[in-house]
Image (cartoon, helix red, strand yellow):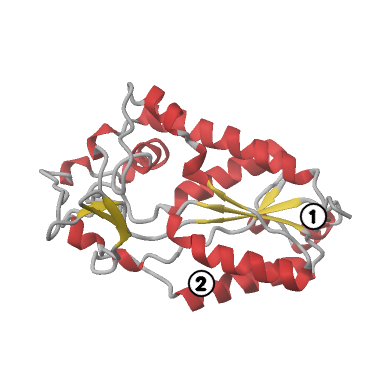
């Protein structure tokens, strides 16, 4: 019989293997991302970056990860072909059912690894409900926030070229899936600096005469290329490798900590 290396992805394991793994009270990672436009040069399946991180972290920490949830809340990207956005209600139901199935099998230490900021409000709602109803805390790691501004400036020669359709996803995707990248389609990209006097800041913010307010832009309002800041031409394989290893290293620290904590988080005041 062919010997196989230790498995850390639940979808590679039989239910008997999973039963034995769950008996050890492990951390189970739930990776998620999105399927959305990332500029004309990067594939829409950015969830694959979160998937690669989850597999690497699970192997590094001796934990387990589920199948990656490939769709997220990406309403502001609708209109760009290939973007698939779930409604808030659908996402909440999918994530709730996922957690419920794992908890029914005795899993207590869950952790979301999110590669898409738009998933945040849904995760907040779900995590608070589960803590209220089950008494269990489920933390979320925003993967790309593990790349601090200081670290990014070091990698990008003193600059911080972050934005949608640029870094860090361009370099990460180039490192992980270079065969799918199309830098030849990038062209002369442009991003709006001002719309009717408002200066866009990120996807849901704007500034007017020094004051900030929420503005619920669609990305097509800001750029017909789907790029909202940063330098999409800055991505390289080597930078992607450095960014990937940093995310895995920092995420592993958080997972190791969660392995040692009671997920019920009893209050320190009792």
- Which residue is drawn at the image coordinates 57% and 63% (left, top)? 124
Q: Position of residue 132 (x, y in %)?
A: 73, 70
Q: Earlier in the sequence, mark 2 or mark 1?
A: 2
Report the side of 204 relative to 146 (left or right). left
Is residue 235 placed above or below 135 in the rendered structure?
above
Location of the C terminus by quadrant is bottom right
Q: Do the CB atoms of the residues marked 2 and 1 lie less than 8 Å apart? A: no
Q: Position of residue 32 (x, y in %)?
A: 52, 57
The answer to which quarter of the image holds residue 68 is bottom right
Q: Which mark is residue 91?
A: 2
Residue 103 can be seen, yes or no = yes
Report the side of 57 relative to 187 (left or right). right
- Which residue is drawn at the image coordinates 80% and 43% (left, top)? 260
Q: Which mark is residue 64?
A: none
Report the side of 177 relative to 102 (left or right). left
Q: Which residue is mark 1?
A: 265
Residue 62 can be seen, yes or no = no
CA–CA distance between discs 2 and 1? 26 Å
Label 2 crowd (10 A; few <14 / some 14-19 / many >=20): many
Q: Say which of 243 and 43 sits in front.
A: 243
């Amino acid at each position: 019989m062919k010997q196989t290396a230790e498995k850390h992805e639940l979808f590679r394991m039989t239910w008997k293997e999973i039963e034995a793994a769950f008996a050890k009270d492990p951390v189970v990672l739930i990776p998620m991302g999105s399927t959305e436009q990332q500029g004309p040069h990067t594939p829409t399946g950015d969830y694959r970056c979160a998937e690669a991180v989850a597999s690497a972290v699970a192997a590094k920490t001796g934990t387990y990860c589920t199948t990656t949830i490939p769709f997220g809340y990406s309403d502001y990207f609708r209109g760009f072909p290939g973007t698939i956005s779930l409604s808030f209600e659908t996402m909440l139901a999918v994530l709730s059912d996922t957690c419920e199935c794992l908890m029914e099998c005795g899993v207590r230490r869950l952790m979301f690894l999110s590669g898409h900021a738009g998933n945040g409000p849904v995760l907040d709602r779900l995590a608070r409900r589960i803590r209220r109803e089950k008494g269990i805390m489920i933390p979320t790691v925003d993967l790309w926030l593990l790349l601090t501004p200081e670290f990014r400036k070091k990698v990008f020669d003193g600059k911080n070229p972050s934005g949608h359709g640029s870094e860090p996803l361009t370099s990460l995707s180039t490192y992980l899936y270079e065969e799918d990248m199309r830098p030849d389609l990038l062209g002369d990209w442009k991003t709006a600096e001002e719309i009717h006097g408002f200066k866009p800041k990120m996807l849901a913010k704007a500034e007017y005469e020094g004051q900030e307010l929420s503005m619920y832009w669609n990305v097509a309002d800001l750029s017909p290329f789907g790029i909202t800041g940063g330098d999409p031409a800055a991505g390289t394989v080597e930078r992607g490798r450095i960014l990937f290893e940093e995310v895995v290293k920092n995420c592993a620290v958080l997972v190791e900590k969660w392995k040692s904590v009671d997920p019920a988080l009893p209050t320190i005041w009792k």
